[in-house]
Image (cartoon, coloured by chain):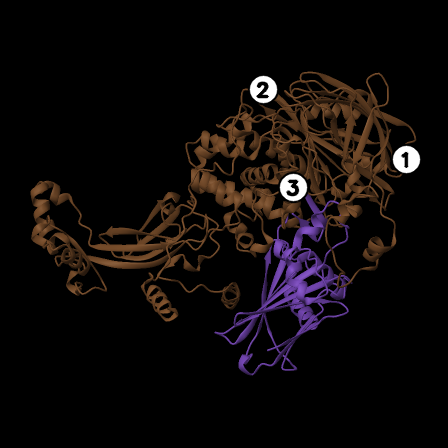
Amino acid sequence: MFKVQSSKCFLPLTINWHKLCLFLKRTTHTMRKSLVFLVVLPLLAFSIGHKFYVTVTNVNYSDKDDAFQVTTRIFIDDFEEVLKERYGIDAYLATDKESAIADEYIEKYLRTKFLVHLNGEQATYNFIGKKYDDDVVICYIEIPDVGLETLKTMEFDNEILTDLFDEQKNIVHVKWNGNKRSFVMIKSNAKGMLNF
Amino acid sequence: MLFLFAVICFAQEAEEPEKEREPGHLNQSKFRQMYDELSTPNTYRSASGAPGPDYYQQQADYNMDITLDDKNVKLYGEETITYYNNSPDDLEFLWVQLDQNVRAKDSKSPLRNGNGVDIAYTAGNFTQTYVTEPFDGGFNIDWVKDASGQPLSYTINQTMMRINIPQPLKSGENISFSIKWWYNINDRPNDGGRSGYEYYPEDGNRDYTIAQFFPRMAVYSDVEGWQNHQFWGNGEFALTFGNYNVNITVPADHIVDATGVLQNRKEVYTKDMMKRYEAAKKSYDKPVIIVTQEEATAKESSFAEKTKTWKFRTEAGAPVRDFAFATSRKYIMDAQAVKMGNRDVMAVSLYPKEGNPLWEEYSTKAVVQTLQTYSKFTFDYPYNKAISVSAKSIGMEYPMICFNFGRPNADGTVSDRTKFGMISVIIHEVGHNYFPMIVNSDERQWGWMDEGLDTFMQYLTEQEFGENFPDAVAPNEKYPSRRGDPSKIVPYMAGDQESISPIMSNPENVYQLGPNAYSKPATALNILRETVMGRDLFDHAFKTYAQRWMFKHPTPEDFFRTMEDASAVDLDWYWRSWFYTTDYVDIGVKGVKKYYVSNKVTKEMQEYMDARGITEADLPPLVYLASEDSENFDENLKGKAPTEVSQNLNEYMMDNMTAEERSQVEEPKYFYEITFDKPGGIPMPLIVEYTYADGTKENVTYPPEIWRKNDSEVSRVISSQKELVGIVVDPQQETADIDTTNNAWPKKEEKSDFDKFKEQVKG
């Protein structure tokens, strides 16, 4: 059988296993374990049929460029819905008739909802572009001139889609020089702080 | 004395060899035969993988009267089961499956998982979890009676009911008994599950896609005895073949379809529907609408108080293992005929207006393609019809009928992912008719045996659909299959070992059922077909398996054995690696050493001779290869023909070959010793592309057995007239190699996905 939790969450047909339907707990020390159980629970035939709204953002430090390379994976239909609600745009993402102004508004939205502070100062970042992978859009963002050697703190404000979905969860994985750290952001707690 | 002892000890310690003697070990070869993993063949199941001379299977026939109470959303049924004991054993009791009990109020299923406090709850989720009473959707058994109407005692243990028959059912005998039951139908999109109703608040109607709705016989077999492993929710079904005779009573304005052949079409169809159905039976190129959207929509605002009874029977010679049905006044219906040998099969679709325009255009088309492709690779579809029913957010399979997702947006627009998602799920679920409905594997124990084989066949069917309907897949050049391509399984196989299980695991106990039961086995079969066996050998063996086990109950061993039996390809290493372990593929080029023919004795050879007190004169004429980093190498050797350098070789060739033969010889000038390493656990064919200085390429595939004596690295010598400039392992990425950074020589600096994208954007 194929079971789909909602239009958001094709399981197991539409396989974006690594980013779907996370079952996360409050405590960070159990988080890695919880991630292990990732897509299991929603598969149960009688698991509660509420929708899961999740984005996954990977932040990788590039030594070569002294930059953070950020990719954010957002479900296309969620993103379309927020562009429609917030800006009144029918974006038709990933279709032949994709709106010419879609990129502009995607960037505008991200700059409003995804903020990064380095050493307490808001970092300016470059929105490089987007591409599609099955039912998600991947946004590429670069934070240049990091100065990792003098970097003490990095702070994320990730409110992507929380203006539309109360139950939105935004996950951020940061990797630098072989270190890893993960955050789960929700509407009421959309901040994540990293000390280097 | 003490002092002395200490000295002796010291001396002994000093004399000990540097390395302790290693202990012995069992046969650890990845190529050893699977005598430990596979059960011993016997007279029920032969070593060839075919059913043995004493193979048997039970039979369960059902007569049922089912009534839907659409107003109160309840289902009532009375059934008589006739059970034939074809086993050599006498049975003291019978086991009947009560799958609906998984959603009984006191079901243990929700209790079997650990949980914790979520970081946040929606109000609705919180209410459902902590405030409201759980839905009670379990079976209510009114009575169980024997053939003479006397009550039979029974015991219910969760989803299994033991019928305590007064006398054992002897081998070769049969028994009839009856059960009366009812249950509350669940709101499937909200409560979950495979069966249930979907409510449409706009018009107050429901559609019902109803399955595992009646007490069903458990399987009794030579492998499991009674397969009475509880239904917990993930592990699907194990069912006995039989004949069904089912009457379904629903409101008179409903459209019904179900497993079996409709017996009273004239009573339940309108005259228009009959006319259109007759036309559909002769329409082989496109579907004919049997119930129009206007007719279906017109019924939405009323509610028939009268009822109609739809009568279905299965055909002799085409038994089914289960029965399901769909019913609603909202259904639109279309159908088309498909030639199947000398018979016709009807491809049918049922959908509410909410499914259009998508369903009208693609559902029946996808059903037709599935019947054609699957039949080509297995056997002719033996049933009279295959129905695809629109059901929000699931895909679920039953004999002849399946429930599939895919709805357009409210404004009628359809995204590509909805369209392809729908076509894919229809292909997959209709395809399940072959695995496990006809090739009747035990899903409760082995999810991959039907899901994996079906997902593999789904990939082949999707690709053929793309070839047959290029307009439907444009602008893609081929159908965008989500599973099957080796590259798609890499993230899973490269994943955290803590969260992956071998394919040969029970579906209840795996971490990620999707890759575990669907994508990984499907990809493993695809790689087996394209890269390991080749299409001809694979296809013949796969078809042999399907035909040997058509209308029977195969086990994993029967599949593994048949694939080898029919192809003469030893695949034990493949089954072990891909199906019994969580190993992954990672093969690379470790290093390349260049050599040239030299007339000087190499250092290693000199040492060899010195050690034995012999000289060159004691040996036959020898030819030497000098490595580029050795003392014997000098630049002058480069580009020279071996006979120019080695007098021994020149003399040998003059003595042993005619002048004409010598003139035809093209002497190799370059020699390379290439070391391939294998950080991954799975031995695979070593597929290598060699590129030479003049741009020509040569592809060599070394069989997987190249790894049989050294599982971690192996060297090969290449001789060539041209300089070798590049080596790539698995150039077409057909083995699901999880790390391709080590696949090339000279090593290529692989750019990250981010850098690649950035370059592409910046142009």
Q: Quadrant of the N terminus of chain B?
A: bottom left
Colour of the chain lettered B: brown
For the point 81% across and 38% down, which residue is it?
B207
User: In x, y percent, where is residue B367?
Assistant: 64, 34
Which chain letter matches label 3? Answer: B
For the point 26% across and 55% down, which residue is it?
B672
Let me know if marks 1 and 2 both belong to one chain. yes
Q: Which chain is purple?
A: A
Placement of B89 over or under A102, stated as above or below: above
Instruction: List the residue tagged with mark 1.
Output: B303
Amino acid type at circle 3 is Val
User: In x, y percent, where is residue B179?
Assistant: 82, 26
Q: Which mark is nearer the camera, 2 or 3?
A: 3
Residue A105 sits in which quadrant?
bottom right
Residue B382 sits in which quadrant?
top right
Q: Earlier in the sequence, mark 2 or mark 3?
A: 2
Foreground of the two, B563 or B618 = B618
Placement of A128 over or under B301, stated as above or below: below
What SS does tag 2 mark?
Answer: loop
Foreground of the two, B213 or A107 = B213
Which chain letter matches label 1? Answer: B
Relative horizontal placement of residue B29, taking residue B184 as reference (left or right)? left
- The residue lying furthest to the front in this view is B1
Amino acid type at circle 1 is Phe
Instruction: List the residue tagged with mark 3.
Output: B425
